Image: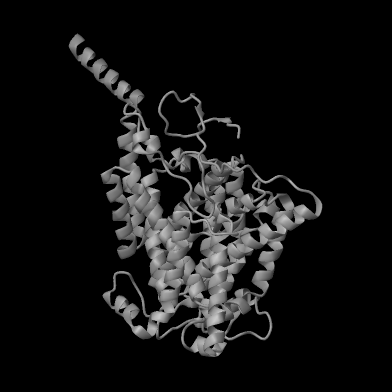
């Protein structure tokens, strides 16, 4: 594989600013988080450490395998159909898992209907986001889905609003997606993506690790409604109840198993590494069906035991509820005062910042891992457009998913044909999504959330030991604690303060700045002496 030169586009780089560097290609896996910052040992002692802390300085990694050979005719169609089916399966699982989190519940307000509606909204989000390729994205193999960190930020805000305001949450989620989409579009239009890329790595890592911890909380609550918080001792007593073990233990074991398969790089006969996660999820579904057949349980009996979502199997597709529910006269009215609350606008600002950074990370990460060059600002504007469209259609925030895209690239996704197939399959899943929600076991989305939680926590906490200084590692844990205990606003405020401190401290170590400070001091001293 030939190596290519590329310009270093970092904002905060050590002199010489015009110097060119050679990309270092390393092996990377799809369906995981392949990018890591430079190890402390890899940075010369006399060199500024700004780039070691910056998202911009993640070392470029690429799959050693070349892109699959371009095919024609039926062979190309078959490969694109398979890649689109895999992408649709991953995107639908992602949408179902995250969509079920936006509406809080309680014994007084179980909100089963709204939770099912949230899953349909998640599928709609996947459908709208995957129009990016049809709208002109340069990633011919790109796959988009609901934005994990942004959805979690809004879910935390909706949880504080309470389960009695689902109509307000329903409308607020759509408005929030549109506002975030406008912010993303502005970043692309103003050509600020490369500046955003210079965010200190430790701050983004602290937020993502906190997101992993909160995902664990939501996963356990999804499978066992009695579990409310990681900080509530009574919740752990609920998990220890022997009658409830069947609700969460299988999903937890499956989620940890998926993480272990990816972390240990286990080779499974006849199953490519890129398809391990879909294969495990399919095995979960088949095992659950087999268990129901062996024990003689029916769907309604399993639903009564809490193994399935408490929704009835529809007689005909009712996908249109994601729009008509807004006009349901029997539902509670929208509380417009919530939109004037400062907490709502602060949440939107926090979500916009994280959504922009997440989109930039996924775009640059995909570029680095596949050696595929695109116009980053144009892609950001496209992200903004389909987020506004998603919000206008009552969907959630979304972004291109690096791991899904790399997987499809490896499977041979090729051109506009793949994008059309992905859109068609995503549309079919959305149209018949209510049937899926009615029969899908809770352990399936629960295991996905636990897997994502383990991936985020392991990557940003365990792997961070290799390249973060002790005080930086402490910052990560402080942000996790603030996120879990106090919410996103205190965590984001702490993150912004830490960003300012880190950038100022690291800029002071640049040789040019140190020299200027020294020369300025000498000039002032010489003037005083001459007087």
Residue at screen point 34% across, 35% down: 41
Q: Position of residue 153 (x, y in %)?
A: 43, 62
User: With respect to residue 277, does 57 lie above or below?
Assistant: above
Identify which residue, 338 or 141, lies in the foreground: 141
Identify which residue, 15 or 401, lies in the foreground: 401
Residue at screen point 33% across, 80% down: 238
- Left or right for 391, reference 221: right
Q: Position of residue 377 (x, y in %)?
A: 58, 43
Farthest right residue in view: 73
Q: Position of residue 397 (x, y in %)?
A: 54, 60
Identify which residue, 294 or 300, lies in the foreground: 294
- Left or right for 440, reference 471: right
Is residue 154 in view?
Answer: no
- Left or right for 386, reference 352: right
Farthest top residue in view: 530
Residue at screen point 47% across, 59% down: 261
Is residue 289 in view?
Answer: yes
Quarter of the image with the N terminus is: top right
Q: Position of residue 123 (x, y in %)?
A: 60, 68
Identify which residue, 87 or 319, lies in the foreground: 87
Tell me which colouring the rendered structure shows: one colour
Farthest front residue in view: 269
Residue at screen point 74% across, 54% down: 417
Q: How many marks?
A: 0
Quarter of the image with the C terminus is: top left
């Amino acid at each position: 594989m030939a190596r290519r030169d590329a310009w270093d586009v970092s904002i905060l780089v050590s002199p010489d600013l015009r110097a060119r560097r050679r990309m270092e290609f390393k092996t990377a896996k799809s369906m995981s988080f392949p990018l890591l910052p430079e190890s402390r040992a890899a940075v010369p002692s006399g060199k500024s450490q700004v780039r070691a802390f910056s998202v911009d300085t993640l070392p470029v990694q690429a799959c050693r395998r070349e892109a699959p050979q371009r095919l024609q005719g039926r062979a190309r169609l078959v490969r694109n159909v398979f890649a689109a089916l895999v992408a649709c399966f991953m995107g639908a699982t992602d949408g179902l898992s995250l969509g079920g989190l936006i509406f809080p519940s309680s014994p007084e307000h179980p909100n089963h209907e709204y939770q099912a509606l949230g899953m349909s909204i998640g599928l709609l989000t996947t459908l709208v986001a995957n129009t990016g390729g049809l709208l002109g994205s340069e990633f011919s193999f790109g796959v988009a889905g609901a934005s994990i960190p942004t959805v979690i930020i809004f879910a935390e805000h909706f949880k504080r609003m309470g389960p009695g305001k689902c109509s307000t949450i329903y409308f607020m989620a759509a408005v929030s997606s549109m506002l975030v989409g406008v912010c993303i579009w502005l970043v692309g239009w103003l050509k600020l993506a490369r500046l955003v890329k210079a965010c200190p790595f430790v701050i983004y890592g602290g937020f993502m690790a906190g997101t992993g911890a909160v995902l664990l909380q939501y996963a356990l609550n999804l499978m066992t409604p009695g579990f409310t918080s990681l900080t509530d001792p009574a919740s752990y007593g609920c998990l220890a109840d022997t009658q409830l073990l069947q609700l969460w233990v299988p999903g937890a074991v499956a989620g940890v198993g998926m993480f272990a398969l990816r972390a240990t790089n286990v080779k499974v006969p006849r199953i490519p590494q890129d398809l391990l996660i879909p294969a495990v999820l399919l095995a979960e579904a088949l095992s659950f069906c087999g268990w129901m057949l062996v024990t003689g349980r029916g769907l309604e009996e399993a639903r009564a035991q809490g193994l399935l979502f408490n929704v009835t199997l529809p007689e005909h597709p009712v996908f249109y509820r994601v729009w008509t529910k807004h006009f349901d006269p029997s539902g509670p009215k929208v509380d417009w005062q919530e939109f004037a609350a400062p907490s709502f606008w602060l949440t939107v600002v926090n979500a916009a910042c994280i959504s922009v950074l997440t989109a930039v990370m996924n775009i640059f990460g995909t570029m680095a891992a596949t050696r595929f060059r695109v116009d980053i600002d144009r892609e950001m504007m496209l992200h903004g457009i389909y987020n506004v469209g998603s919000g206008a259609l009552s969907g959630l925030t979304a972004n291109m998913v690096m791991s899904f895209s790399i997987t499809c690239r490896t499977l041979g996704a090729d051109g506009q044909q793949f994008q059309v197939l992905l859109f068609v399959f995503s549309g079919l899943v959305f149209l018949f999504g209510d049937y899926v929600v009615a029969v899908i076991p809770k352990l399936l989305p629960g295991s996905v959330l636990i897997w994502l939680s383990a991936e985020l926590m392991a990557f940003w906490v365990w792997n961070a030991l290799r390249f973060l200084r002790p005080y930086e590692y402490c910052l990560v844990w402080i942000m996790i604690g603030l996120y879990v205990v106090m919410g996103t606003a205190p965590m984001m405020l702490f993150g912004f303060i830490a960003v300012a401190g880190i950038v100022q401290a690291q800029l002071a170590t640049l040789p040019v700045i140190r020299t200027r400070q020294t020369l300025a001091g000498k000039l002032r001293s010489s003037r005083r002496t001459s007087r």
